[in-house]
Image (cartoon, rainbow, N blue to C red):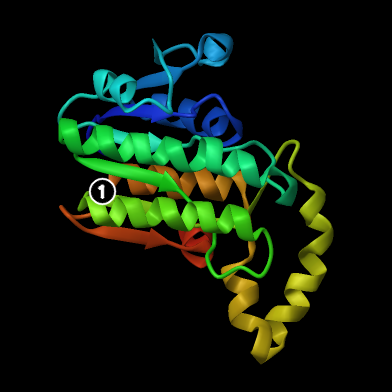
Amino acid sequence: MAKTLDLLITGGTGYIGAALIPRLLARGHRLRLLARAASVARVPAGATTILGDALDPETIAGALRANDALVHLVGTPHPNPSKAAEFQRVDLPSIRASVTAARRVGIAHLIYVSVAQLAPVMRAFVAARAQGEAIIREAGLAATILRPWYVLGPGHRWATALIPLYKLAELWPPARESARRLGLVTITQMVNALVTAIEDPAPKGQVRIVDVPAIKRSGVLQ
């Protein structure tokens, strides 16, 4: 079992956070969740709630402590091409606010859920997350960036119909790399990869990328 860590999580009441937080609590980590008043009821027992705005660097800095790990899960729910304005209004400003606060406080590690890059669709979403990654790199933080494409789980299963097409694409050499990079991962695989990233932080000043094949390989550290 890894040592107990102090974590601040933004966006923790959403799809991925709902699966991740119970796992982190079960592993003994001390969690604080930054949440809006409307989301407080969804904060799991065992985590400390901090009321605040994930788009405001002052709020985030006030919730952080030196040497914390900051897990950034804020994002537009069910992203699709019609939500391009939301990516610019929520997704990008929230990671900018988190990075500003992280630099000010001097945290140990930032974990950011991005998206698979160089994708042929969802261009506005991919572009916003790429900008978020650039902000992290420019800040010089120790960070782990996870790049899933689509995370299968409760309420997120429509893409299972594409699995046969993925298998065929992986058999065709010209499409193999793209099929693997833009592959589907399960919510369990995603949570395992996040726990692994949290408990095995990136070296100081380095940015580590965890792509779809690596997410699928990730196990939970003992």
Above or below, comparing residue 196 to residue 103 in the picture? below
Front position in the image: 136 or 176? 136
Q: Residue placed at 49% from the left, 57% from the top?
A: 147
x, y percent for residue 112: 41, 46
Q: Quadrant of the N terminus?
A: top left
Q: Residue furthest bottom?
A: 173
Above or below, comparing residue 76 to residue 177 in the picture? above
Front position in the image: 154 or 133? 133
x, y percent for residue 113: 47, 47
Q: Residue placed at 65% from the left, 74% from the top?
A: 179
How many numbered discs sit on the rendered protein?
Answer: 1
Above or below, comparing residue 168 to residue 146 in the picture? below
In the picture, measured across the screen, residue 131 lies left or right of residue 86, that is left
x, y percent for residue 23: 46, 31
x, y percent for residue 69: 27, 35
Front position in the image: 169 or 2? 169
Q: Residue placed at 65% from the left, 47% from the top?
A: 84
Quadrant in the rendering for residue 77: top right
User: Is disc 1 surrounded by few (<14), some (14 to 19) or many (20+) residues within 10 Å?
Assistant: some
Q: Residue placed at 80% from the left, 63% from the top?
A: 162
Is disc 1 placed on a helix, strand or loop? loop
Q: Residue furthest right?
A: 161
Quadrant in the rendering for residue 126: bottom right
Residue 165 seen anywhere in this rendered image of the structure: yes
Q: Which residue is mark 1?
A: 201
Question: Tag 1: residue type?
Answer: Pro
Residue 1 seen anywhere in this rendered image of the structure: no
In the picture, measured across the screen, residue 49 lies left or right of residue 138, that is right
Q: Quadrant of the C terminus?
A: top left
